[in-house]
Amino acid sequence: ASSLKSIGRTLHADIFAAMPVALSLPAIARAARPTPGRVPREPVQPLRKRKPGSEGDEEPAPMAVSAETPKAVINSARAAQLSKHVAIIADAQTAFGPLFQALADLRKDLSTEFHPPIQEAISVGAVQALVMRMRDSATQPAAMVETAWALTNLATGTSAQTAALLDAGAGVALLTALQHPAITDRSDLCDQLLWALGNIAGDSDVQLRDHLLKAGAVGSLGQLFSRMPHFSWNFAMRAQVLRTKTWLLSSLCRGSPAPPLEEVDCLFDYFIQVVAGSEDARMLAEALWGLCYLVDGALSDDDAAARVDRILLAGFGPGELPTEHPVLVKVVQCIGRAGDCQNPLAIPALRLVGTMLRLHKPQLIDFATAAGVLPALRNVLLDGHAPEQVRRDTAWALSNIAAGTAAQAQLLMEEPRLWEALCAGMEQASSKQIRKECAWAVANIAKRSYSATTGRRPDPRQVLGLVARALKKDTFDAPLNRALLDASEVALRYGDELARAAGLRENTLASHADELGLLDEFEVLQRCDEAIVQRKAAYLIDAWFGPGVENEMPETDEKTSSKKSEHGRSPMRSEARKFGA
């Protein structure tokens, strides 16, 4: 029990201490293997369910490696060939030489890239034979590696095929094998066992993940890594196993419905330590995804906020939180180079930051801005090589900052080139989704900035022009239309203040809005079906463009506003949509 609870808090620190140099050194990159696969011993490599994070998906999904062949049309010739290997493996009297060769042949057959004979292997009893060998304490380490490798490939099939492995006891057998004495000298055996477990945990059917959790997967990993500092592995071996371990732990936190928090709560500490202490891109990316999954698993926004607090408070006592939080600084650094398709860090880092910002907790926004999130997001928005989805969600994150306090919205105006980047995205982005999110950000900034008493404000003429051109070019949903109308109102109201301060009776901004064609857009929206948009458009027309107004300022008491705003507020980008949806 103590091992299970300490895996994040102490064991990882022990592993770092046992290494000749810290994991954060660039040496780990030099020691990394050229591909995520095993060191080649054969022309073909084992198949592995991994998340294709380099493709810019909002959430990496398990690869569909093979399609299940209906049992009625199983290739009888392939099944017959496999049955010969299985018969040798299942015979407890088989000598090591023939056993090793049969295991290697079976593994090679299952390593076929297209349509591997997974269903044929299951039908001839391969799973039961492999599990028997995995459980047999007399099985030599080299044969165990081949056994785990074959199970790894079998776990790349459909959910039903992977479930067949668990039904035969493969999950418990793999977890038990992690305590095998041979692992002390065989990092390849440990890595392959973790790899097989990762394929099972990463399946789209979360029942398979839950099966491993109920079997004590986290506790088994805790016991394994409490022994790891005493193993005879070199630095590169430790690094490779830690990469696979982090991927496995991340997979155990993933999926919907999320795993019970009590099963994975201790992994917060582990992932945080990886983020803070490692520069290995693959390990770091998996740790970031793990934190994303843990936060996404919250049952409510309050629960999500509590989980984010769990991340921020790790390693700090009450009142000790620094303004520039080291973990957030590292996460923000990972957002950089979003346009580099070889960089696996930007998407999970941006997702984690975006999730924090959409909770609309002023303190979380303050921590993010103190960590340097504004220049990082600006650079991504301006990066023409960044994937469309990444740029869209960058604008979404910025719009949620703008929906914070007036002071927080003001920071977006003060950040060099950020306002200009949002305006350019709102008008020039080829993707409507990017234009939409930039429009949200611009609208929120405008609504906050004009209410502030100090600081830089956007040019009201520019705001009116942006709104007019956006409404002409795109058809938006009702909440965004309402937000754009509100931005128009605050700009026009600001024009009233300017005219009053100058002693003028005419609000020149109203005339400018008419010249831009904004009145025509208001009239269109006045006839729409959404009441919140219809009422606001009617109010704007009546207040600034109605009969007899002629853009003149009415006589008012100095303590009262010239116009009373239409009741009802538009959303300040409070929409809690899933990142990347």
Image: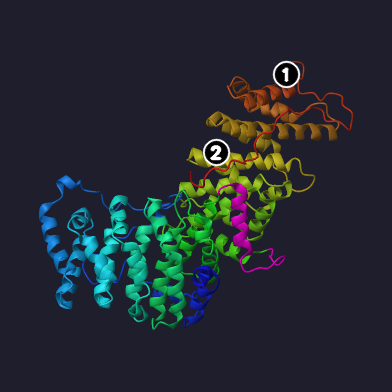
Extent of the magenta region: 299-323
Residue sitting at 62 percent across and 62 percent down? 312
Secondary element type, mark 2: helix
Number of disc labels:
2
Q: Position of residue 375 (x, y in %)?
A: 60, 56
In the image, is residue 318 part of the stretch drawn in magenta? yes
Residue sitting at 47 percent across and 75 percent down? 26
Q: Position of residue 524 (x, y in %)?
A: 59, 21
Q: Quadrant of residue 459?
A: top right
Q: Earlier in the sequence, mark 1 or mark 2?
A: 2
Mark 1 or mark 2: which is in front? 2
Identify which residue, 158 or 427, lies in the foreground: 158
Looking at the picture, which amino acid does disc 2 mark? Lys
Task: Relative to 357, say whether 575 is above or below.
Answer: above
Identify which residue, 569 or 312, lies in the foreground: 312
Looking at the picture, which amino acid does disc 1 mark? Gly
Residue pointed to by mark 1? 546
User: What numbered label is drawn on residue 357?
Assistant: none
Q: Quadrant of residue 165?
A: bottom left
Q: Position of residue 329 (x, y in %)?
A: 60, 63
In the image, is residue 171 part of the stretch drawn in magenta? no
In three-dimensional space, the C-alpha distance between marks 1 and 2, rounded to whole angstroms, equals: 30 Å
Q: Is residue 179 left or right of residue 124?
A: right
Q: Is residue 560 left or right of residue 134?
A: right
Identify which residue, 174 or 253, lies in the foreground: 174
Other residues around mark 2 within 10 Å, as few (<14) / some (14–19) / many (≥20): many
Q: Quadrant of residue 242?
A: bottom left
Residue pointed to by mark 2? 436
